[in-house]
Amino acid sequence: MNYYFDEFQQELIQSARRIGRERIKAVAAQYDREGTFPWDIVKVFAEAGFFGISIPEEYGGLGRGVLDLVLVTEELSRYCGGIALAVAATALGTFPIVISANDEQKKRYLPALAEGKMLAGFGLTEPSAGSDAGSIKTRAVRKGDRYILNGNKVFITNGGAAKIYTVIANTDPGKGTRGASAFIVEEGMPGFSYGKEEDKMGIRASCTRELVFEDCEVPVENMIGREGEGFMVAMKTLDKSRPGVAAQALGIAQGALDLALEYARTREQFGQSIIQFQAIQFMLADMATQIEASRALIYAVSRNLDAGEKNVAKESSMCKVMASDTAMKVTTDAVQIFGGYGYMRDYPVEKFMRDAKITQIYEGTNQILRMVIARSLIRQLAKHA
Ligand SMILES: Cc1cc2nc3c(=O)[nH]c(=O)nc-3n(C[C@H](O)[C@H](O)[C@H](O)COP(=O)(O)OP(=O)(O)OC[C@H]3O[C@@H](n4cnc5c(N)ncnc54)[C@H](O)[C@@H]3O)c2cc1C
């Protein structure tokens, strides 16, 4: 389907596709096996300008928006959802600065992020605060010109690879979500260290690590916004970044469909290629239909965000739920089309199924996002009652 992208977007898609084909495709299985971070490919992403896509031009970025980031994430994820995440997770860590930081903070951090000289991460989740993000325990207490942070963040994407992290901590525990504040924490700040590195089912080329704060000293000027605005910063960030997770899911689904089509064309049983069987054709037709529907929704939501639409929690959740459920279904069906070979690590398709699963879990599980969507529907009902 023609989505009528401008020239810049078309070039961006071509560039990401070329990098996917030439640099990622051949090494995706190796990174998956070894679970190492793809620094060599991150360099290629940086040269292509991918890290600067949604950073304003005045801070060294390309001044584009969510849609352009989505297009690149989708293309890269067709080849490896884990490697693509280096771009998407850096955008997640960068959005709070782009959206809510002051000019001085933007000048300090955005140019290096835009160039890909350093990566970023986003630290919200804690051992006892996942879906219930409002119950975070990491504490930030002001002492003179510093905040002293204590606590830990788990499952942080780009953990250990990134140089800066936007971290949500509690400055006023009695106030619940209104007591949270956002900080930019740099690697090397006193009292900041890395903890457990996770060994994951999928997206194994992405590093996922614990951040540990033990009397960690963060300068006052590293607070984003004001005290008590941290949760708002986090929610605005996630509204903007969820189409990126959806795009990762979409790319994974498309990559699995590409493989399934080619396999179905070449695999013969009962004297003909299996693509001749209607059972296989219907599966392929459903896969393609669900992918295209997800794509249309993601692009529409991204365009809305780029046009400055503010109340997008429902739509941003919808595209993530739809694309990630599609990715899980499509990748499972792709394995089915490969038959027994699909179950084997010698073939690339099982990796897509493992990589797809995370997209239903992070940046709000699909159960939580369905609650967000339903609450919005109920609010609309009340308005029109
Ligand atoms: C690979 C990976 C990378 C990640 N990257 C980051 C990152 O960069 N930054 C970050 O801050 N976090 C990150 N996360 C954390 C991720 O966002 C959380 O894992 C996710 O929000 C779910 O939290 P939880 O794991 O504690 O599950 P829980 O909240 O304990 O949920 C367990 C189950 O209960 C369900 N559930 C919980 N509450 C409800 C409810 N009210 N109604 C119905 N069902 C409910 C959930 O949907 C889920 O099925 C990452 C996680 C993973 C696995």
Image (cartoon, rainbow, N blue to C red):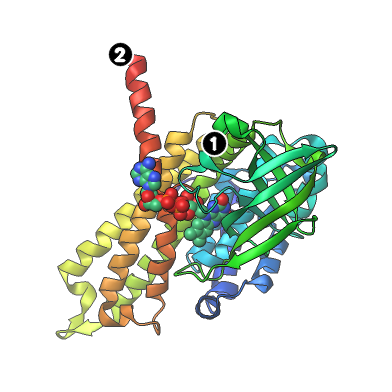
Identify the residue shown where x is 23% and y is 63%: 283
Q: Position of residue 332 (x, y in %)?
A: 30, 66
Q: Report the Cα–Cα distance between label 1 and label 2.
A: 28 Å
Write down the residue under mark 1: 305
Q: Image point 32% across, 77% down: which residue?
A: 263
The front one of 370 and 334 is 370
SS state under label 2: loop
Give x and y (percent) for residue 200: 48, 69
- Residue behind label 2 places its C-beta within 8 angstroms of ligand 1: no
Q: Is mark 1 within 8 Å of ligand 1?
A: no
Count of numbered labels shown in the rendering: 2
Label 2, residues with CA under 10 Å away: few <14, some 14-19, many ≥20: few
Q: Is residue 236 above or below residue 111?
A: above
Please say if the residues under marks 1 and 2 sit with CB atoms less than 8 Å apart.
Answer: no
Instruction: Report the disc number at residue 202.
Output: none
Q: Which residue is mark 2?
A: 385
**Which residue is located at x 73 percent, y 39 percent?**
141
How far from the left and from the top, in percent, is residue 360?
Answer: 40, 54
Within 10 Å of the Cα at label 1, are there few (<14), some (14-19), or many (20+) other Cα atoms?
many
